[in-house]
Image (tube, rainbow, N blue to C red):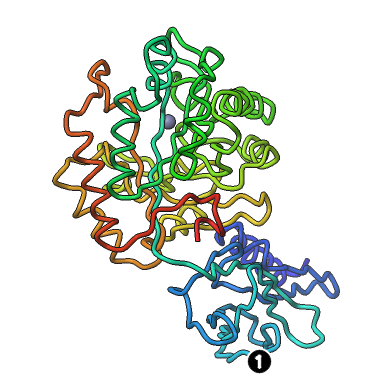
Amino acid sequence: MPLLACVFYRFYTLHAVAVPRIIQYMVKVLFLKRADVLVVVLLIRIVEPVDGAILNRNDGRLTSEGLEIVVRGVTSRKYDKVFVNEEEAEVDGDRFTCRIVLRGLENRIVAFTRGSGCADVITVLWDKNSIKRYRFSVDDNILFLKDLALNSWKYGSIFDNDFLSFWRDVHEKYGTKVQFNIFYQTEGFKLSEMPDKYKSEWLENRDWLRLTFHALQEKPDLPYRNATYMEMKRDYLLVTREIERFAGKELLSNFTTIHWGEAPIEACVALRNCGIEGLVGYFTWNYRGPSPYETVITDKPCVSYYLDNEKVKYLSRHDYWKDMKTGIVFIRHDIVINTLELGEITNHLNKVAEDPHQSEIVELMIHEQQFHHSRPEYQPDYEEKVIEAVKWVTDKGYKPVFYDEGFIGA
Ligand SMILES: [Zn+2]
């Protein structure tokens, strides 16, 4: 190989290592050995929106036709004409922009140049009926179910339990819908011991109550970080079949949060194949307590399932995103209430509200443990904290929803 070609080869090899892997997929480097000359051809790539983006009224302009959005991308300079679906894009050097209209729920967008064979295709979803909405989820639940089972001889109602009685008060006052993500077992109790005597009452309250799989049990931490397909499926079915038996399948949701929010793609696909359509997480990086939203200290994603830095970065600034490959919708928690002091809750939510891409869907979350005197995590102002957050969303006009209703709750 002549010297010049070697230099070219070295440059492009180094360059290829330096660019993120995702761009490498999009850039086809063609090594034409003819006369030992290296030719690099950059094709065409849509940069914005991202594949799997879920777009709503805050991402464009609503017209009588649909949602008008701007598509941005990069192209090699040799192409001066770029098209996006039926429109011709504005090309400026190696960048293009184009306005297009989304008309349906699922929209494929193709950017291409005539006759070159160069094209990039993405799919985006239009959240057509989007409104400001919120859901309350409670993680790590098992103690209230144990109480209902142990006292079933004297309880006539699920609301004889203090914890559920508190949540019913919140629902009755503010209309809040609450999803409890639950364990299969804890010391001295398994869901298989949960009596079905309350079943009709669970069903009567299905308009505001959900029960879904969270994990087998509380400890050890990060139980699904290395889970296989079969391990996740086994635990999911263990919990789900019990919920169906003692409460009814109507209480289940196809959105849940896995304990510690980390699992490999194969385990998440197992959940998807079991009917789970969405997973909720922090989509942040390892942090030093107390709040995951305060200080980003490493570049390693946490509570982000199997998603890489690039996806986590996107979700850290957006309410939701769909992985088109696995078919899983990811939704970001906006607040973990037990990690904040009572006086910090309103400020935190005001900050979330500053960005319309993060505040269309507000996911309020708290854990069960801090409610109970018997637990070392007990927080005496647990109820006040919950009410503070619920008052905030109510005052701001958010509608209480479940994500399994309509299109992600709208
Ligand atoms: Zn958990």
Residue at x-position 44% and y-position 24%: 221
Picture coordinates of residue 111, whole percent (x, y): 68, 79
Q: Is residue 363 left or right of residue 327?
A: left
Picture coordinates of residue 293, whole percent (x, y): 30, 48
Say which residue label 1 marks. Answer: 88
- Most foreground residue, 260 or 78: 260
Q: Is residue 300 visible?
A: no
Identify the element where label 1 is drawn.
strand
Q: Is residue 235 visible?
A: yes
- Judge whether 160 appears above or below 285 on screen: above
Identify which amino acid the numbered label 1 is placed on: Glu
Residue at x-position 56% and y-position 83%: 95
Residue at x-position 43% and y-position 66%: 131
- Judge whether 160 appears above or below 296 on screen: above
Q: Quadrant of ligand 1?
A: top left
Question: Quarter of the image containing the N terminus?
Answer: bottom right
